[in-house]
Image (cartoon, rainbow, N blue to C red):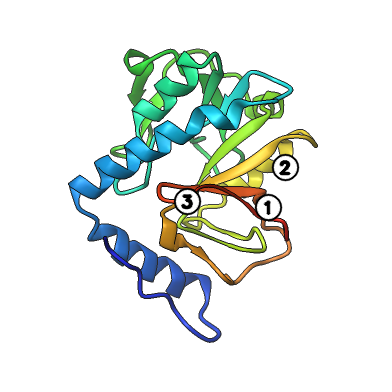
Amino acid sequence: MNTPQHPTGEADKREWRHAIGTARSAVSAQQQVAEAGALAAAVPGLLDGLRSPTVCGYVPFGSEPGSLGLLDVLRDAGARVLLPIVPDDPGPLEWAEYTGTASLVPGRYRGILEPGGPRLGAAAVGDAALVLVPALAVDRQGARLGKGAGFYDRSLVFTGPEARLVAVVRDDELVDRLPAETHDVRMHAVLTPGNGLVTLPAA
């Protein structure tokens, strides 16, 4: 399995993104398939005790961990699954319901798939009891490293007070400390292929 070479000392977000991106580019197809299966198997347990059947997920892009199969597992377990739509201008993500692979269409960025159904607006994430968040890495204080566009930081402020924010990363992408800013929204837990759900008490 590929192990990232993490930055040390006072490395900034750019250095972390480069390091994690380099490691992810070396992940084999076999590893991605195995990880996707492990993540999908862990997902039904996340739904226990939720106040709402609505879950926000995402379609993995490139070497991001996860799969469309994970979204189908959520639907089969009774969840209403919303997926993000990247807006034309910088701002919060919009959302639409995922009703199966046939409902996906190409998004505004090449290679990204989005739901083609009616747009529900940015505030729809407020209906979700569980939000699965893509990340490059997360630290044990709940700080999340994204790709830098800021879409999720602008979107997660619309979540309800009881919503659980769970970042999906590889095992080695849960790290001790990341550079963080005051506006960064903290994660409550991470989901990894090898360790399942890891709660972050410091968050």
Q: Does residue 31 appear left or right of residue 81 in this picture?
A: left
Which label sits in the foreground, 2 or 3? 3
Q: Which amino acid lies under the numbered mark 3 shown in the image of this protein? A: Asn
Dividing the picture into quadrants, the one containing residue 95 is top right
Image coords of residue 83 (percent x, y) = 50, 27
| Residues at discs 2 and 3 in contact (Cβ within 8 Å) | no
Question: Which numbered tag is attached to residue 125?
Answer: none
Image coords of residue 87 (percent x, y) = 52, 35
Q: Which amino acid lies under the numbered mark 1 shown in the image of this protein? A: Val
Above or below, 81 against 148 in this view is: above
Q: Which amino acid lies under the numbered mark 2 shown in the image of this protein? A: Val
The residue carrying pointer 3 sits among few (fewer than 14), some (14 to 19) or many (20 or more) residues within 10 Å by Cα, namely few
Above or below, 54 against 139 in this view is: above
Residue furthest toward the bottom?
A: 9
Q: Can residue 58 be seen in this view?
A: no
Residue furthest toward the right?
A: 161
Q: Distance between the residues labelled 1 and 2?
A: 8 Å
| Residues at discs 1 and 2 in contact (Cβ within 8 Å) | yes
SS at mark 3 in the image: loop
Q: Which residue is drawn at 29% across and 39% down?
A: 110
Question: Which numbered tag is attached to residue 185?
Answer: 1
Dividing the picture into quadrants, the one containing residue 186 is bottom right
Label 2 sits on residue: 157
Q: Residue at x 64, y 26 (%)?
A: 48
SS at mark 1 in the image: loop
Q: Which of marks 3 and 1 is nearer the N terminus?
A: 1
The residue carrying pointer 1 sits among few (fewer than 14), some (14 to 19) or many (20 or more) residues within 10 Å by Cα, namely some
Above or below, 124 against 90 in this view is: above
Label 3 sits on residue: 195
